[in-house]
Image (cartoon, grey):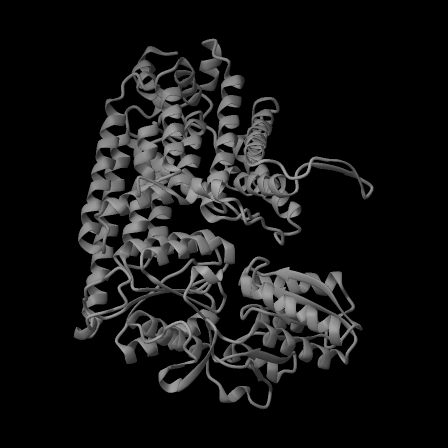
Amino acid sequence: MASRTLPAMKDSMGLRPRRAGAQQTILAGVLLLEIAAFAFLGKNFFTGTNAFEVTRLSVEIGLLALALTPVIITGGIDLSVGSLMGLSAVVFGMLWRDGLSIVLRGRTLWETGPLPLPLAMLLTLGLGGAAGGLNALLITRLRVAPLIVTLGSYSLFRGLAFGLTRGGVENYTNFPESFLFLGQAYFLGSIPAQLPACLIVALGFWLLLHRTTVGRALFAIGFSPEGARHAGIPVERRLALVYVLSGLVASLAAIIYMSHLGQAKADAGTSYELLAITAVVMGGTSIFGGRGSIQGTLLGLFTIAVLQNGLRLADLPPTLAGILTGGLLLATITLYRWLARGSAFGPALQPAAANAEELNVKNAQVAVISIVILLAALIVAASNWYLVRSLRPESTATHSLGSGNGGSGGRRVTLAMMPKSLGNAYFKACRKGADEATQELGVDLIWDGPTEPDPAKQNEIVDTWITRGVDVIAVAVENRPGISSVLRKARQKGIKVITWDADAETDARDFFVNQATPQGIGQTLMDHAARVLGNKGEFAIITASLTAANMIEWQKYIEQRRVEKYPNIKMAALQPCDDLQSKAFAETNTILNAHPNVKLIMAICSPAVPGAAEAVKQSGRTDVKVIGLGLPNDNKRYVHEGITDCIVLWNTMDLGYLTVFAAEALAKGTLKPGDQDLAAGRLKRIAIAGDNILLGQPFTFTKENIDRFDF
C-alpha cells in the first residue's frame, strides 16, 4: 500500500482515535442539548425513573444496533435482523407451547411435547446463529453482495414467520411469570430487568472491536478487503463471525421483546432494522466500512431514544421523531459522499473495493452537520410547543399534572387517549367527538398512537404516559394480551385505565367503553350477509388484523351465527388489510380471482369497506356485493351505486365523546364499580352492564338513510 495512505489507514483502523473521539464528544453534546431542552419542555422528563424507562424501551433496538456495528464496519449490512426477530419469536412460542415434531403425510412420526423455557430459549438462540450463518455462507462463499443476501433473507425470515403462523393468525401468549420477569420487572424498584443483558452484550462487542486482534482485522477488512487478504487476515472467517453474531443477537432481542410484550407474533421486530442502522450511522460508523465504535453507536441510540421520549413527554407531535431520525440518516449518508469531494484525504481513504465516487469524510464534518440538524429540529419542536400553548384558551393553557390522584382538589383532568392507528378515518371521527367532550368538560386531552396498528408501539406510548403522570389512560386495544401488562403497571401507579373500541384483560382496566356488543355486531353482519346471498353461497371476510381482539370477537359471533342459522352459507376466505384501504383493494382482487364463487365481501374495518367496493367496481362483477363496518361519508358513493348493499356501525363521534365523559367521571370518582348508568352530556344517561359502558346497538346505513349522516 502506498505510504501516503498509511495515516489514513491507521485512522480508519482505530490506531488514531482522535477524530472519532471528537465526533463522539460532539454527539454527546447533542444528547446533552436534547436532555436540557426536554427537561424544560417535557413533564417528568428529567427524572431518574424516566432515564431508566428510556433505556428499557431502547434495549431491543439497541441490541440490534450493537450487533450491526461490526457488520457495517466490515463494509457490509444486515437487513434481516428485524425479520429474524419475528421468526425467532414464532419459533420460540411454538417450541414452548407445542414442542418439536416430525410429521410425514399427515402422520406424526416423532414429537417432544412442550419444551422447558430454558431449552426453548437455547434452541431459539441456535436458530438465530444458524440464520446468521446462512447469510455468512452466501456472502463469503458465493461472494454475493451483503445487501442482496440480507434483502433476500429479510423476506425469507418474515415469510417463514407468517407461514408458520398461518398468515399471522397464530400467536403465543400466557407465558409464565418467570419469563415475563425479563422484560417487565425491575431490580431495586427502577432498574429494568433486561438492562443487564444489553450492557453485557455492549461490553462484549466493545471488547471484540476495540481490544482484540479480531476487531482490528474487522476494521482492516472494512478499509480494504483485498489488502486484508494480502496481510494474511482470514477475511471469510471474520465476516462469518460478525453475521453469525448478528443473527444470535437478533434472536436474543426477540426473546426480550416477547418477555416485554407478553406475546410472540410473526410481525415482531418490524422495521427495527432501520432504526438500528440509523443509530449505528449516527454514531459515526462509516457506511463504507473501516471506521466505527461501540461508544458512538450507543450515543446514536440514545440520541434517537431521548428524542422520541422527549417529544411525547413535551406533548409534541411524535411523528416529528420519525421525520428527524429518517432525515438524519439520509443526511448523513449524503454528506459522507458530498463533503468528502473537497477533502484532500478523499482518494487516500478509499476502500480498495469501493467505487471511485465513494469518497470518505471527516467525522467532525458529519458531527457538525448532525448537530445543526438536531438544533434546527429542537427549535421547530420548541416553536410548535409554544404555538400550541398560545392557541389554547387561557383556562386550558397550563395545569398541574398528577399521578392518578383522580383529579382531586378541582384540578383539571389530563386524559391520554390512544387509537389503534392515527391515520384511520374511523378514529379521526372518534377524535372529533373526543374534542367536543373535552371542550364541554375542560379536560386536557393528549391524543397519540402508532401510525399503523402496532402492539409494541402502543406499549411504548403507554409507558411514556405513565412517566408523564396522566390521570387517565384510554386505549383502543390492538392486541389484548400484548398491552394488558403495561396497563396493569399504570393501574399500580394509581392511574385510572379505560379501554374503548377493543378491550384488554379485565384486570388491566377499570371500565370498557363498548360501542356495541360483539354478539350484536356479529349477528347483524351475518344476517345482512344471508339476506344478500339468499341464505346460500360463499362470502369472504376482510379484517384489519388477524390479532385484533375486537375483530376476533366479531368473527367468532359471525361464525357462530352462520353455523346456527345459515348452514348453506360458506366462508371462503379471511384476509387482513392492516387497516389500509389500498391493501383491502388488493386483497379483494385476490379473493375474486382465487374464489370465483364468492358473491359477497364482508369488510369488518372502516378502510376495508370502500377499498373492497372499489375493487368490486373495477372488476365489473355486478354479481358481487359488499357489506361491512364503515363510515357513511366513505361509502355513500358505493351505496348509491349499488356496489355496497349496506354498512353497519355506530356513531363513531359519540364513541369518542362517551369515552372522554367516562374518563373524566372515573378520574373524579363519580364513576365507580357497581354503577348502573352514567350521565354523558348530550347522550343523556348511558347504561352500564358490569364494567362495560354501553354506547348502544349497531345501526345499519342503507341507500335510504345514509345521506342523513355526515361523519
Does 355 sit above or below residue 497?
Answer: above
Question: Going by the picture, which residue comes out furthest to the front?
Answer: 674
- Is residue 50 left or right of 117 when viewed as pictured? left
**Residue 503 located left or right of residue 33:** right
Pick the front one: 18 or 565: 565
* Residue 101 in picture, x, y percent from top left: 72, 37
> What percent of the width, then of the height, locates residue 244?
53, 26
Of residues 688 and 221, the one drawn nearer to the viewer in this rendering: 688
**If the image is split into quadrants, where does the N terminus sit?**
top left
Please identify the quarter of the rendering in which residue 655 is found.
Answer: bottom left
Q: Is residue 481 visible?
A: yes
Identify the image quadrant of residue 494: bottom left
Query: Is 645 situated left or right of 147 in this image?
Result: right
Using the image as rendered, state which of residue 556 and residue 652 is in the foreground: 556
- Against 52, residue 711 (above or below) is below
Q: Position of residue 66 (x, y in %)?
A: 40, 32
Q: How many marks?
A: 0
Q: Residue at x 67, y 62 (%)?
A: 574
**What residue sits 61% from the left and 52% below the top?**
168
Q: Is residue 620 visible?
A: no
Residue 169 x %, y %: 62, 54
Q: Quadrant of residue 591?
A: bottom right
Q: Residue at x 17, y 53 (%)?
A: 40
Question: Looking at the image, which residue is at 46% across and 77% down?
Answer: 652
Residue 367 drawn above or below residue 449: above
